[in-house]
Amino acid sequence: MMKKLLLNFLLFTTLGSYAQENLNFNKQKEITSPEINTDRSVTFRLDAPQAKKVELQGDLLAAPGTAAMKKQADGVWTYTTTTLKPELYSYSFIVDGLKIRDANNVYQIRDVASVVNVLIVGSGKADNYLVANVPHGTVAKRWYNSPGNGMERRITIYTPPGYESGKTKYPVLYLLHGMGGDEEAWAALGRTPQILDNLIATGKAKPMIVVMPNGNVAQQAAPGEDAKGYYKPTMQLPHTMDGKMEETFPDIIKFVESNYRVNAKPSQRAIAGLSMGGFHSLHTSRFYPKTFDYVGLFSPAIMPFGKTESPVYADVDASLKNQFNNGLKLYWIGIGKTDFLYQAVADYRKKLDGMGAKYTYVESEGGHTWSNWRDYLVLFAPQLFK
Amino acid sequence: MMKKLLLNFLLFTTLGSYAQENLNFNKQKEITSPEINTDRSVTFRLDAPQAKKVELQGDLLAAPGTAAMKKQADGVWTYTTTTLKPELYSYSFIVDGLKIRDANNVYQIRDVASVVNVLIVGSGKADNYLVANVPHGTVAKRWYNSPGNGMERRITIYTPPGYESGKTKYPVLYLLHGMGGDEEAWAALGRTPQILDNLIATGKAKPMIVVMPNGNVAQQAAPGEDAKGYYKPTMQLPHTMDGKMEETFPDIIKFVESNYRVNAKPSQRAIAGLSMGGFHSLHTSRFYPKTFDYVGLFSPAIMPFGKTESPVYADVDASLKNQFNNGLKLYWIGIGKTDFLYQAVADYRKKLDGMGAKYTYVESEGGHTWSNWRDYLVLFAPQLFK
């Protein structure tokens, strides 16, 4: 009796929400995929006996394109990569032309409207964002009021280990996502909580609060998290780069400074962002003089802003000069050598050079990727609030 | 130039982390799936021109099993359900025997080692857990120290709207997951934040803190969230029902009561759980007399506990009697008519009846499902802290 009850228990709860309603489930072989081998190569497996062609796609392949997986006698398709550099990789399978996720890997990330599986090949630089046995900060999904946008908006906030039980006031890094992202991007794709936990634990970065707002002012929250329900996310949203985010940025600062124990002064405020978030950081930090002593532009979208009535984009050069004469402590720019924004950033640097502005410039391998943005955060955060 | 830059920008950022590294991506037709029709039927679509057979599987089908999808001339397979009751449904496609997720639907949930797509058919009871335009509480992923387990452990905590900016002390509901779940289950599958936001906004439930711990004491955190990295989750873990969770429960209470503004008294403490979490709630509330005035057993695993040296399971009947003479305000039991634990719960009720214990009993349709557990939370929470 007890054995049968236990067996039923395991069986039914494994099936989760399908449970008794739907027992005719698909039997799959017990396989492991991905398997990270001791030489840091990775083996992928897919049980698809009826498939004619299975390919692997992802940023872990040596060359662009796809790699053909090979069918074993038991119907399982396999592919083993070469030895890989430490990195967070994403991949999909393509089965007879149909792109699918790996059913044996529950780890995945959403980027705009697509979801892909991820894996982390460890050691080296990946140690920066693997979970380690160190004190962990808190990640909170909160809502704040934005009178400037006339709505409640969702925001992700990392507080460092010890914040909740202490009395110390902390500095704040405002960290902004790119186009198609939202308030969940830096925590999920950027692995910000893990990076900060690790940098703080090793004494490389000062304990700080990291504020990750949603930079799409037309949205209240990430897809699925507001009253619009479950809709298909799209890349293009209104009011992303028209000044509205910068104009309403004080709503965020006000919320943070009245709800958290923070040091409300320029030397304790940093702003950084990737791509569109770099654009927002550039203009926000310039438009509000003496607000942020630390600025980080990660693969920034240095874009012409065309016709807009926003006061944010008036007198760009004058306000930039003013910003650099402001007591600014760090103006950090990072970009990949093959980034499509490389030339625009080069032109922007020329402008800064012409002004005699002092900034730190890092040129990395690769392009417009989360791999670079995680690395830039690891480089940038230790330089803050010294 | 500006147009080209913008186009590149949209193109590259859409590709996300693949970006420039891998442009040979799979072209899929722009289709919508799932589409919730005005009559509350749902249409599913899958672009799979090479497939021979495509089936739909999920708890939204009228009968157990799978439903055959039909191939259109353009290679898109479709299926439309009958009119559905309001509910959160989960589903998968089966393409030539291979179970896959819907690439057009980014909304999904993980249950143990499987990930399935979800959709919500609205109105009716689903309004309880859809995001509404109401004040929203905060959901925090924190870590607490458990000396009893010798480790830092992750915990999910919902604080009601107004908590952070106020001075009020709040009551606390401790809400426990089932076997195979973790500290993320109630927030994700159970939609606890949405349910509490909605019940509080309509005045149906008192503002309360909801604490969602990880009931697997062998784990520090949900899969992927601790230093073990990305591993394949398994159903069976050591020390799930051997007394260890109950023995170390005071670590959780201590953490909550020393880190949050709470009313630290029995009349302001509730404990509830589903399945294994119902087992934990039953024994924890009984083992610590005068600690919880409110107890909720949702499809509880009333299991024989066999040989264990834990003091938790000694003198069950005597301590149960003691609990019911304790000033207990609510002992709530809910179970579905077709739940495999139905008989065990009936036997337990007989035992309670024999003791003259007063409890509230709710028998619902259906079985051992998250659909029932969300409903039970909606029924249970309004009865707390009166």
Image (spheres, coloured by chain):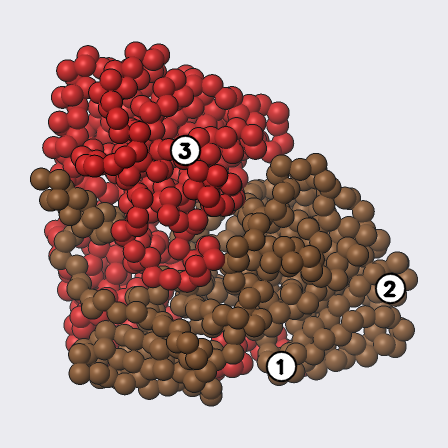
Chain colours: A brown, B red
* Figure quadrant of the C terminus of chain B: top left
A166 left or right of B246? Answer: right
- Where residue B147 appears, as percent x and y from the top left, is 48, 39
Q: Quadrant of residue B355?
A: top left
**Dot 2: what SS?**
helix
Q: Residue furthest front?
A: B309
Question: Which of labels 1 and 2 is toward the front?
Answer: 1
Q: CA distance from mark 1 to mark 3?
A: 50 Å
Task: Judge if badges 1 and 2 mark residues of a common chain.
Answer: yes
Residue with the mark numbered 2:
A324
Q: CA distance from mark 1 to mark 2?
A: 28 Å
- Where residue B240 appears, as percent x and y from the top left, is 30, 43
Which label belongs to residue A365? 1
Which subunit holds the residue at mark 2?
A
- Where residue B356 appears, as percent x and y from the top left, is 19, 12
Residue type, label 1: Glu
Q: Quadrant of residue A251?
A: top right
Question: Which of labels 1 and 3 is toward the front?
Answer: 3
A212 left or right of A247? Answer: left
